[in-house]
Amino acid sequence: MVNEEWYPPRRRYWKDATQKEQDIPGDLWVKCTDCGTMLYRKEFEKELRVCRKCGYHFRLNAWERIAITVDEGTVIEYHDNLEAADPLDFPDYKDKVRKAQATTLLKDAAVVVQAEIEGYPLVMAVTDSTFMMGSMNSVVGEKITRAMEMGIEKRLPVLAISGSGGGARMHEGLLSLMQMAKTSGGAARLRKFGIPYIVLLTNPSMAGVQASFASLGDVIIAEPGALIGFTGPRVIEQTLKIKLPPDFQSSEFQLAHGMLDAVVPRSALRATLAQLLEFFNG
Ligand SMILES: [Zn+2]
């Protein structure tokens, strides 16, 4: 169950941005984005926001994701005060960031915590698609890299969870693009120091994020039905003038093409991660 009780108080808000319009007044029922089935909210929350009819996995924001993944009461957050600068004086960027901060109560699109899963300690970096599509800027790249450095320092496994559809954030230009190199360097250092690096890809994981830290895990798992790729299918179809298969860039497609190690339903994620941590611990 998505338990909001133990979030830090200022985190108690979230709703899936994609869900909002579908919600029925009174909040008792939720309509499945995919198949249209009406889901009783209490059951829906218990089932970790997965449609019981078609298995559609609703998006979770970073804190909801952390809440369903780790052991209750084990979370320590790090680097939560890092904020984006506006180095290019990009039109409206400051306003956009301020708005995203107001609606998500995050400073930027990534959260770094130390926590435990089934008693196994780890460092986690989670990106949040409700904050400017989880796009990677100097703050997101820095936080992910710091999480990796903390893993090395404390000799703890690192889990990166991507909910990033925005790739590198264009408002910070080259500084955003450089985060691809920086986080990739972080992943290489994890390998050098023998620290396990696990990646969980959720819907969506695209572009610069997917082309850097999100595809470099020792083990890469994904939730069912997530969109995972570099350039989106629409742009590819328009540019190359070809028709792509309907499941193109889905988790299942990527698994079949050797890009993933496993597709794991949300209900089994905690157990799978615990199993991996136990394996790496041994
Ligand atoms: Zn459904």
Image (tube, helix red, strand yellow):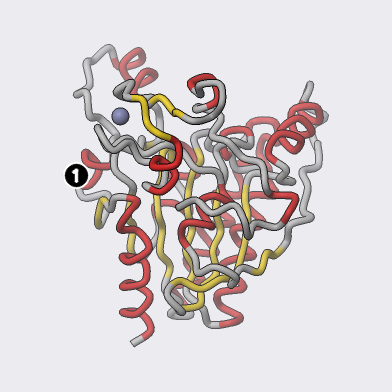
Q: Is residue 206 visible?
A: no
Residue identified by numbered label 1:
257
User: Going 23% across and 15% down the picture, which residue do you hit?
Assistant: 242
Using residue 93 as the reference point, say whether residue 57 is left or right of it. Answer: left
User: Going 47% across and 54% down the picture, which residue do you hit?
Assistant: 161
Q: Residues within 10 Å of mark 1 (few under 14, many from 20)?
A: few
Using residue 8 as the reference point, say whether residue 211 is left or right of it. Answer: left
Residue 120 location in percent, x, y?
45, 78
Q: Is residue 37 visible?
A: yes
User: Going 62% across and 40% down the picture, which residue do you hit?
Assistant: 14
Q: Compare residues 157 and 176 and report the one nearer the observer.
A: 157
Residue 69 against residue 35 in the figure, above or below: below
Q: Secondary structure at mark 1?
A: loop
Residue kind at label 1, given as amino acid type: His
Residue 219 location in percent, x, y?
33, 63
Residue 47 location in percent, x, y?
37, 47
Residue 261 location in percent, x, y?
25, 57
